[in-house]
Image (tube, rainbow, N blue to C red):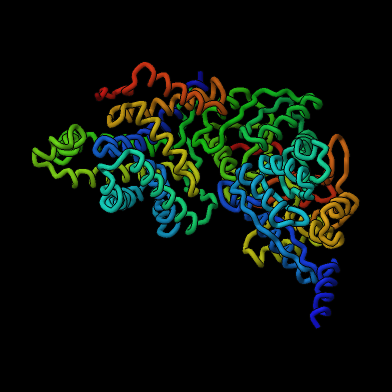
């Protein structure tokens, strides 16, 4: 009897389908990035639910990095050595992801980063690091291309926070505008959390730029736009790169957010398979509109879990599976390719959107557009 | 020129609020010789109080100062009587640990209740401005908060200089033992001073909430700022804190334009070090031996 049980035990642990897939999650669940981290948490929870319905024996190990790279790194060490996970999804911010990426390579743990923008992360030839979202250069190029197709701007001003995300996004944007013949008339970085950006905005106003390109997280985006209105900064378009300009909180501030152009990785009205359904179920479950972070996290978790299951929880096989695989889901077609110096980077199609009557409407590319763009930026009331 | 004037005016207006935060801290230090590291967190409590009053009762943030001020006074008095009073004669590091601990409890309790989401107060005048001329505009809410700050500061000066209680507080600040020998109830003065300090911090929180954003960890930034202002002006000097606050506001604002916004904290700290180097007791401080 005992022998039989033992044999049964051995078969149970050996057959890949029955064994629990242990997958690690690193995310900013508390701390200053928590409001965005929450979307990633929710996206992953919804993925977990869907996968369990499909019969996956999934076991997630959650780690909170509080938005700090050093905590993120120790979380990765724990997941790699103590918990023995098959792969890791996360972390959120660029700074954390970049720190964790090198550790993932060291421990040979497949890491799938859902929504960090810094290009560098997948440009270091790291074999075990994969990224779902389009990196910072896409934010910049899609926004600037949109502005160039809508009007004839000649000058541009940059305002960005002096973090990894802000400097890397604006640096690639500056490189990009140089190739398009736009002249940079102001270049302002700021320390986030200041109460007062008026003096900088007044300085930018004095240069009278055609475009204002901003890179900020949630709260500063609202503050920057409020104070732009205060000082009467009036360009042809405000271009908001990611994060802070793509939240429902921002759109709700109608007095200052109307007609601001931003770009996003995902919306729920895009025609990618399952996107609409995901949006509805997310709203029903969490009572909020999903952000692109949620969609990226959902797709990342589904892909990681499926690949890890097929690989029987083996890290090397999971890595190979991610590298070789091709998926089509709520994020459109996903493939981790090597191009333009990137390694294992999903060449994702960005969507350009504009806030019109308090809602995000896709304006470009044309096949996904829901409304016609409003250009130039209307006079401040 | 317009850029310079704009920066100068924004700097003075924001400096007024900084001054209010600094005065609270310096008052507490003057009377009790305790550096209150929970000062920013008390300010944060004031912000959330304003937020609740605004969203639940619909009372304008500037009007709600009338409610916030007394409530924060009671809160400060309570903190002093129950916690701070016990460490008045303890080692400085124990006092610091206690206030830091209290601050952590406050910020984490608020995080449990409200989550770490950023809250933004949107009033009808949140983004409205007044044109001063010459291309310079002033934010209406910032201007109102500056006027309220000035009124409160003036009232505070009057209170400290003219009333019996105010004089008793100053006497306690000058020499605690001598004050006690003269029949001043120094324990009561400590409670009043801490209450006032908290009320000022809470009010500052209320005043900046229409133009800033609110989250549980917001206190850290302001604790550091208040500390710099207080030391810059001279520990325990109310006039010094007023000057220090405005000076820091202007430095930040001008530094952001003429050097770099990302470096504005560095500029403030360099100024801080220079003052300490040439006048170690601070701008208005008397050196104590």
- Residue A152 in picture, x, y percent from top left: 76, 30
Can residue A225 be seen here?
Answer: yes
Can residue A262 be seen here?
Answer: no
Depicted B288 relative to depicted A310: above or below: above
- Name the residue at the left extreme: B182
Q: Is A224 left or right of B33, judged from the image as shown? A: right
Residue in the picture at 57% in, 28% down = B262
Depicted A184 relative to depicted A142: above or below: above
Quarter in which the C terminus of chain B is drawn: top left
Q: Is A372 left or right of B230, judged from the image as shown? A: right
Residue in the picture at 36% in, 46% down = B98
Q: In which quarter of the image is residue B193?
A: top left
- Name the residue at the right extreme: A324
Depicted B143 relative to depicted A288: above or below: above
- Residue B62 in picture, x, y percent from top left: 37, 46
Q: Quadrant of residue A240?
A: top right
- Residue A8 in picture, x, y percent from top left: 83, 76
| Closest to the observer, B58 or A34 | A34
- Name the residue at the top extreme: B278
Q: How many marks?
A: 0
- Residue A71 in picture, x, y percent from top left: 61, 46
| Closest to the observer, B60 or B12 | B12
Q: Is A92 left or right of B150, judged from the image as shown? A: right
Residue in the picture at 67% in, 22% down = A185
| Closest to the observer, A264 or B135 | A264
| Closest to the observer, A32 or A222 | A32
Residue in the picture at 76% in, 64% down = A277
């Amino acid at each position: 009897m005992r022998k039989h049980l033992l044999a049964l035990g051995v078969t149970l642990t050996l057959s890949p389908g029955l064994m629990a897939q242990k997958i690690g999650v690193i995310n900013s669940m508390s701390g200053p990035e928590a409001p965005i981290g929450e979307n990633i948490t929710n996206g992953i929870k919804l993925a977990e639910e869907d996968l369990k319905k499909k019969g996956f024996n999934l076991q997630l190990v959650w780690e909170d990095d509080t938005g700090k790279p050093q905590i993120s790194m120790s979380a990765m060490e724990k997941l790699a050595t103590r918990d023995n996970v098959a792969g890791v999804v996360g972390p959120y911010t660029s700074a954390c992801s970049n720190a964790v990426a090198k550790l993932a390579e060291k421990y040979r743990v497949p890491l799938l980063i859902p929504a960090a923008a810094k290009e560098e992360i997948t440009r270091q030839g790291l074999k075990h690091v994969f990224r779902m979202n389009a990196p910072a250069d896409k934010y910049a190029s899609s926004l600037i291309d949109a502005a160039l197709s809508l009007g004839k701007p000649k000058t541009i001003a940059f305002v960005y926070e002096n973090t990894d995300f802000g400097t890397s996004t604006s640096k690639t944007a500056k490189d990009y505008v140089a190739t398009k013949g736009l002249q940079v008339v102001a270049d302002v970085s700021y320390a986030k959390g200041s109460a007062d950006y008026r003096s900088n905005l007044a300085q930018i106003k004095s240069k009278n730029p055609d475009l204002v390109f901003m890179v900020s997280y949630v709260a500063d985006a609202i503050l920057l736009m409020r104070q732009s209105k205060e000082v009467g900064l009036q360009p042809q378009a405000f271009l908001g790169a990611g994060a802070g300009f793509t939240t429902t909180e921002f759109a709700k501030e109608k007095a200052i957010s109307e007609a601001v152009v931003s770009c996003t990785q995902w919306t729920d009205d895009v025609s990618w398979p399952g996107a609409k359904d995901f949006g509805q179920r997310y709203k029903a479950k969490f009572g909020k509109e999903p952000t692109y972070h949620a969609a990226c996290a959902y797709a990342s978790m589904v892909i990681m879990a499926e690949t890890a299951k097929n690989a029987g929880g083996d890290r090397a096989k999971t890595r190979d599976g991610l590298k070789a695989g091709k998926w089509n889901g709520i994020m459109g077609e996903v493939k981790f390719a090597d191009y333009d110096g990137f390694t294992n980077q999903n060449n994702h199609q960005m969507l350009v959107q504009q806030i019109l009557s308090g809602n995000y409407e896709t304006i470009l590319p044309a096949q996904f557009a829901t409304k016609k763009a409003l250009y130039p930026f209307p006079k401040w009331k | 020129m317009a850029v310079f004037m704009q920066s100068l005016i924004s700097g003075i207006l924001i400096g007024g609020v900084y001054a209010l935060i600094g005065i609270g801290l310096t008052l507490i230090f003057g009377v009790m010789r305790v550096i209150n590291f929970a000062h920013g967190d008390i300010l944060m409590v004031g912000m959330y109080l304003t937020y609740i009053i605004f969203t639940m009762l619909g009372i304008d943030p500037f009007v709600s100062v009338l409610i916030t001020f007394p409530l924060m006074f009671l809160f400060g008095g309570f903190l002093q009587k129950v916690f701070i009073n016990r460490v008045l004669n303890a080692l400085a590091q124990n006092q610091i640990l206690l206030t830091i601990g209290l601050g952590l409890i406050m910020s984490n309790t608020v995080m449990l209740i409200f989550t770490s989401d950023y809250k933004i107060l949107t009033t009808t005048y949140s983004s409205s401005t007044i044109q001063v001329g010459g291309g310079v505009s002033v934010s209406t809410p910032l201007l109102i908060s500056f006027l309220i700050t000035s009124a409160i500061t003036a009232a505070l000066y009057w209170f400290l200089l003219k009333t019996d209680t105010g004089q008793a507080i100053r006497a306690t600040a000058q020499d605690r033992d001598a004050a006690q020998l003269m029949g001043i109830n120094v324990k009561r003065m400590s409670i009043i001073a801490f209450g006032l300090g908290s009320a000022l911090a809470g009010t500052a929180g209320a005043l900046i909430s229409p133009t800033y954003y609110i989250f549980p960890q917001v206190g850290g930034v302001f604790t550091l700022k208040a500390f710099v202002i207080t030391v810059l002006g001279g520990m325990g000097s109310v006039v010094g804190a007023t000057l220090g606050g405005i000076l820091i506001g202007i430095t930040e604002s001008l530094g952001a334009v003429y050097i770099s916004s990302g470096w504005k904290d560095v500029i403030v700290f360099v100024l801080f070090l220079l003052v300490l180097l040439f006048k170690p007791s601070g701008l208005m401080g008397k050196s104590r031996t």
